[in-house]
Image (spheres, grey):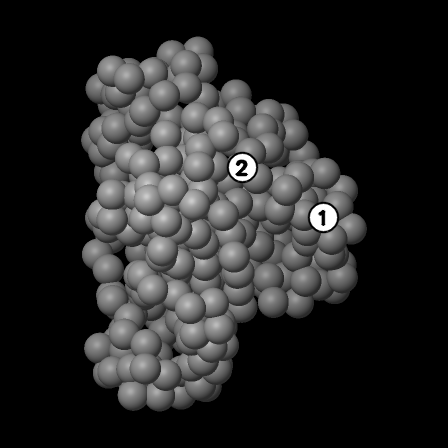
């Protein structure tokens, strides 16, 4: 092995994203670029994802509940053990909206440190948007003048307007926003098990109102016929699975999928026609998402109506990939892999 190879292979990297609904871990090592896409630089070693509902009841109580804390710590202990088993040497461990908004967010982070030895960093909305953009931007149509990236989370939704940089394959951030609106908060406010047409429209209007200030910020942003949406979240990946008719979710078929506006409308309509029990039984949804997915569809529908586009690209990637790439960049690894 050459000196250059040993230098960039000495680290094993980990990125942990603790959101309002999910706890996700990705462990990877750098690898040499095979095509001109950032994610070709990541050799995934291990991954973990669990729905913990950290933000359950947070909107009403103002603080993270004891059951949610225990569920989350159990998941974080698994993450800790995986990082130890894989000899992780560089890591970024973040917490997002639930911890940002909870009265006991800092106390929860300290409790996690005492119980697991993991030190979580509660990141800002801007940092969250930046990571999402870094992790997903490589999927944007390189010929589009601008692209709207959105990440529908459990407790917040990030939107990032990306424009084409002077270098054709690169993207630069034009503007961004973070809404205190996610699938957990919306479902708890309106209900998620039984969602009739009136309730769905109420959810959608609520989301549209929250989007209005970002509409004003982007009125002068340049568009072209290739303008499109780029979505990353459980909502859009679930919709893609339903659209494809998958019996079980398959990341390799979903990540990078293009869906036309008509295909997206049909997939949302199909989901809305399902009963709660049918959503539970669906292999791409399951019992842990069945009461949240329609709230996500309402937010997605509001984005589609507010920022019309002929197509959406689906990304099963985001914050974790963005964190890993920034860690590798800080180590000077990326420049060695071209």
Mark 2 burial class by Cα count in 10 Å: few <14, some 14-19, many 20+: many
Q: Residue at x 38, y 42 (%)?
A: 2
Q: Is residue 312 above or below residue 280?
A: above
Image spot of residue 47 (x, y percent): 52, 60
What residue is shown with label 2?
A: 314
Mark 1 burial class by Cα count in 10 Å: few <14, some 14-19, many 20+: some
Residue 308 vs residue 111, the one in the foreground: 111
Residue 118 vs residue 307, the one in the foreground: 118
What residue is shown with label 1?
A: 273
Image spot of residue 293 (x, y percent): 57, 55
Image spot of residue 260 (x, y percent): 59, 25
Q: Quadrant of the C terminus?
A: top left
Residue 127 vs residue 117, the one in the foreground: 117
Q: Is residue 97 above or below residue 325?
A: below
Q: Which mark is residue 91?
A: none
Image spot of residue 264 (x, y percent): 61, 33
Q: Is residue 25 above or below residue 114?
A: above
Q: Quadrant of residue 228?
A: top left
């Amino acid at each position: 092995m050459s000196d250059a190879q040993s230098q960039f292979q000495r680290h094993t990297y980990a990125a942990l994203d603790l959101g309002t609904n999910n706890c996700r871990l990705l462990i990877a090592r750098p690898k040499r670029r095979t095509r001109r896409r950032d994610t070709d630089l990541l050799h995934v070693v291990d991954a973990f994802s669990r729905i913990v509902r950290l933000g359950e009841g947070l909107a009403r109580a103002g603080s993270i509940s004891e059951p949610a804390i225990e569920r989350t710590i159990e998941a974080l202990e698994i993450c800790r053990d995986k990082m130890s088993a894989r000899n992780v040497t560089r890591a970024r461990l973040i917490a997002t909206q639930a911890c940002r908004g909870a009265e006991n967010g800092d106390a929860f982070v300290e409790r996690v440190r005492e119980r697991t030895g993991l030190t979580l960093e509660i990141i800002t909305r801007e940092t969250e948007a930046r990571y999402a953009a870094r992790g997903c931007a490589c999927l944007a149509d390189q010929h589009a003048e601008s692209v709207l990236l959105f990440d529908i989370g459990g407790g917040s939704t990030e939107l990032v307007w990306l424009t084409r940089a002077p270098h054709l394959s690169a993207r630069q951030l034009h503007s961004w926003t973070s809404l205190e609106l996610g699938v957990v908060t919306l479902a708890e406010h309106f209900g998620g098990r039984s969602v009739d047409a009136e309730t769905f429209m109420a959810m959608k209007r609520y989301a549209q109102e929250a989007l209005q200030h970002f509409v004003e910020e982007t009125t002068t942003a340049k568009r072209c016929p290739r303008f499109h949406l780029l979505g990353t979240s459980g909502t859009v990946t679930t919709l893609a699975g339903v659209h494809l008719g998958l019996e079980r979710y398959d990341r390799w078929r979903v990540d990078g999928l293009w869906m036309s506006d008509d295909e997206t409308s049909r997939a949302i309509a199909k989901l809305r026609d399902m009963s709660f029990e049918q959503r539970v039984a669906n292999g791409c949804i399951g019992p842990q998402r069945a009461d949240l997915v329609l709230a996500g569809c309402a937010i997605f529908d509001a984005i589609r109506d507010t920022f019309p586009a002929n197509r959406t690209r689906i990304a099963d990637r985001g914050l974790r990939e963005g964190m890993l790439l920034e860690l590798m960049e800080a180590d000077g690894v990326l420049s060695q892999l071209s």
